[in-house]
Amino acid sequence: MYARLCDMEILSSYVQDVSVGDMLTVQALVSNPLDWQHFYEKISTIKKGDKTDFMVVTAEGDRLQGTGDIAEIERWSNKGRYGFKVKISVKKQKSLTDRRTRMPKKAMQPVVERKLEMAPAAPMAMATVSADDIASFKEMLKGSLAMDISA
């Protein structure tokens, strides 16, 4: 699970619960006080009613992206464990997983087997090259810049 909301990334090691519907709820649990300080600074700037973009990957692997308004935010500490919950009222949402799986597959064209009939190969004749053939070839290439044959 993964969540990115309110300019804050919450990795799977912190995400405790994600529920999606008309309300997106992300709950995180932090045990390291230094990490909590980082999250606390980010959470303190969030106000109820703020607009935010979000992107969430659920435990099933579904990816959801959208926008919404902050409906509720709460934070707590309990014997060295810290946590917070953010509820977002979803305005627009799209599922990136659905878009990826709904793409139409190209129509499979049936494989047509064709048999090529080959004519029997004619025996190759041996060609001999004479000195006159080489001289005429050199004469033909004299004006060519691509080929420089020295005698």
Image (cartoon, rainbow, N blue to C red):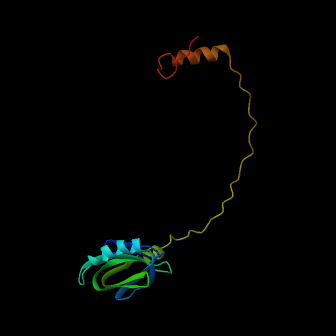
Q: Can residue 28 be seen in this view?
A: no
Q: Position of residue 63 (x, y in %)?
A: 43, 76
User: Quadrant of the image for the C terminus?
Assistant: top right
119 or 126: nearer the viewer: 126
Q: Can residue 50 be seen in this view?
A: yes
Q: Position of residue 24 (x, y in %)?
A: 36, 85
Q: Position of residue 96 (x, y in %)?
A: 42, 75
109 or 45: nearer the viewer: 45
Q: Extreme bottom residue here?
A: 22
When the figure is inspected, residue 116 is found, relative to residue 8, above or below; the finding is: above
Who's the residue at 37% across and 78% down the image?
94
Residue 108, quarter of picture: bottom right
Who's the residue at 52% across and 17% down the image?
148
Who's the residue at 56% across and 12% down the image?
150
Please state if 67 lies on the left or on the right of 20 as rendered: left
When the figure is inspected, residue 92 is found, relative to residue 8, above or below; the finding is: below
Q: Extreme top residue here?
A: 151
Q: Where is residue 22 in the image (x, y as percent from the top left)?
A: 34, 89
